[in-house]
Image (spheres, rainbow, N blue to C red):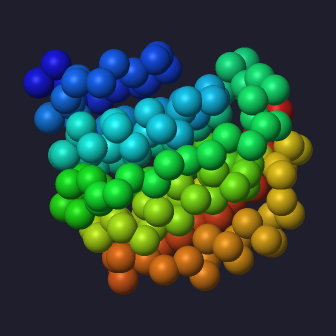
Amino acid sequence: MPKLREAYVDVVYDDGLVFKELEHLNLCVCREDSSNLFGQLLKDSPNLRILDISVVKDHATDELNGTVSWNQPNFVPECLLSSLQTLKWSRYYGRPQDRDIAVYILKNARHLKTATILADTEEHYVPNLQMIKELALSPRASSTCQLVFVEDLYSSV
């Protein structure tokens, strides 16, 4: 799929697919293996500019209540070094793996302009103030990155 520019991914990922031209990715992190899939997709998408991370309520299962670990890559994907400009995370719960992924992106995305975090106001795992502090105080590779934190008032829809 060398010409693919935008994708919504909600499947089991097969290693070896490379999305060289992908610029906009909407990734559902509802499944247990989503966080590891995320690292592989970043690696395989060197031109990614916009990353939308979400939890689709209909997809969410008891896995959201479990402790799913995220294996941080031992390398920084090219898209974080050269192209990612926008991060939007809808239905951010503040689970440890959510925080680890968000902090990893902020710490490594050199050209990130905006990171918008929409916290789930009904089902979040940590208080909103704690979520804000954890992300606001995390180091950022981009000195111009603006972190916007919003309570997602429509999360129950």
Compared across the picture, whether 68 is left or right of 71 comes to right
User: Quadrant location of residue 143?
Assistant: bottom left
Q: Nearer the viewer, residue 125 or 24?
A: 125
Q: Which part of the image, by quadrant, shows the N terminus?
A: top left
Residue at the location (63% across, 51% down)? 97
Name the image quarter holding the C terminus.
top right
Residue 69 falls left or right of residue 26: right
Is 140 above or below relative to 108? below
27 vs 152, left or right, is: left
Q: Can residue 88 be seen? A: no
Q: Position of residue 2 (x, y in %)?
A: 11, 24
The reply, left or right, for residue 150 in relation to residue 124 is: left
Vertically, is 9 above or below 73?
Answer: above
Relative to 128, is 36 above or below? above
Which one is in front, 37 or 145? Answer: 37
- Report the number of discs: 0
Give residue 32's position: percent from left, percent from top: 63, 29
What's the residue at 55%, 30% (across, down)? 33
Residue in view at x 48 percent, y 38 percent = 36
Residue 51 lies, in percent from the top left, at 40, 45
Residue projecting furthest to the left: 2
- Asked whether residue 11 is in view, the answer is yes
